[in-house]
Amino acid sequence: MEIFFTGLLVAVALLITWFAFYVVYRLLHEEK
């Protein structure tokens, strides 16, 4: 159960990191 919880935590952390980079990339490359 601990391995599952650790894996889930890592997956969530990676998802949040990827989403943050995606938002920053969109904001920096959005020309108006």
Image (cartoon, rainbow, N blue to C red):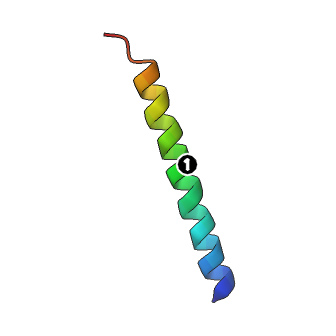
Q: Quadrant of the N terminus?
A: bottom right
Number of callouts in the render?
Answer: 1
Residue 9: where, in percent of width, then height?
58, 69
Label 1: how many Cα within 10 Å (few below 14, some 14–19, many 20+):
few
In the rendered image, residue 20, in percent from the top left (x then y), is placed at 48, 42
Amino acid identity at mark 1:
Thr
Q: Is residue 4 above or below residue 11?
A: below
The residue positioned farthest toward the bottom in the image shown: 1
Q: Residue furthest left?
A: 32
Q: Secondary structure at mark 1?
A: helix
For the view shown, which residue lies furthest in the top direction? 32
Q: Residue at x 63, y 80 (%)?
A: 4
> Residue at coordinates 49% horizontally, 28% vertically from top-left?
25
Left or right: residue 6 versus residue 30 is right
The part of the image, by quadrant, that contains residue 31 is: top left
**Does 27 sit above or below residue 31?**
below
Task: Tell me where residue 11 appears, x and y as whole percent.
Answer: 59, 63
Residue drawn at (43%, 27%), measured in percent from left and top?
26
Image position, residue 19 (x, y; %): 48, 45
Quarter of the image where the C terminus is located: top left
Left or right: residue 14 compared with residue 25? right
Q: Quadrant of residue 8?
A: bottom right
Q: Identify the residue under disc 1.
A: 17
In the image, residue 29 sits, relative to residue 16, either above or below, namely above
